[in-house]
Image (spheres, grey):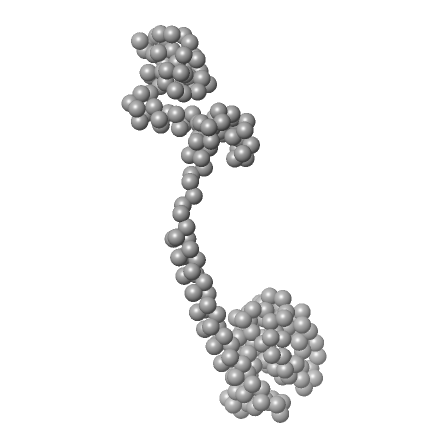
Amino acid sequence: MPCHYHLVNDETTENSEWRKFLCFPFSARALNFFTNAQIKTVGQLAAMSPKDLRRYRNVGWKTVVEIKMALANHASPQAAATTPLSDAAPLVAISTNNDIEMLLQEQIRLQTELRLVKDKLAEARASTPGKPKVKHAVFARWLELRDYNAVSNEFCLTQSRVRAIVSKAFREKLESQDRGEVDIYCYWKETRDYQRVAQEFDVPEFLVRNIVVRWNKLGYGSTVT
């Protein structure tokens, strides 16, 4: 069992007792608390209530229980038979046992309250209607305004992102109507008029231009009739 003797400066009677107390397998948080709070004797620590301990940074209920259990173990009859303790040892044992019982009850109460809060959060999430997808909202707003700059500012998106969302939405719309890019490209080859094609298929003119450019780059100009 590790003993943290580095926290003891000299070998007085009180420090000798503190030296033995430090043989308890304390967590790093508890050891840091001893250093920060300048705890140097068992009596000094035993005199602190759970509320006193909780006032220190990084000392939670788990650390408080750990410290109180160490005090109870140090002041137990078994420890008294093998370890010389101060005259206050029986009183320390009684007080620490009471503290532990109180802390355990407090832990149960807090766990019950936490469970109730989680249940309420789950109910609230289940009853909250789902938010509309951003892409659908962007497309609907664009159909209303027909202004990429205004829509991009409203949704905090770049204009290129808005164009991509609008393009994808129109492509999905075409697919639902059994019409695709090949239909747009063929009609453009027939008319060579971007605006007319856009009106015919009810899509933005930039989408028609993008489709034409892409199909031409892929070399479909001579194969699609």
Residue 212 screen position, x and y as percent: 41, 14
| Residue at 51 percent of width and 79 percent of height | 102
Q: Is residue 2 above or below residue 174?
A: below
| Residue at 58 percent of width and 86 percent of height | 92
Note whether residue 82 is visible. Answer: no
In this view, the residue in front, 111 or 140, is: 140
Outermost residue toward the left in this view: 178
In this view, the residue in front, 215 or 71, is: 215
- Which image quadrant is residue 31 in? bottom right
The answer to whether 135 appears left or right of 71 in the picture is left
Note whether residue 138 is visible. Answer: yes
| Total tally of numbered discs in the picture | 0
Q: Is residue 171 above or below residue 75?
A: above
Residue 195 screen position, x and y as percent: 43, 13
Question: Which quadrant would the C terminus be assigned to in this image?
Answer: top left
Residue 10 screen position, x and y as percent: 70, 79
| Residue at 48 percent of width and 70 percent of height | 110
The answer to whether 139 appears left or right of 98 in the picture is left
Q: Is residue 33 above or below residue 220?
A: below
| Residue at 64 percent of width and 73 percent of height | 34
Residue 178 screen position, x and y as percent: 29, 23
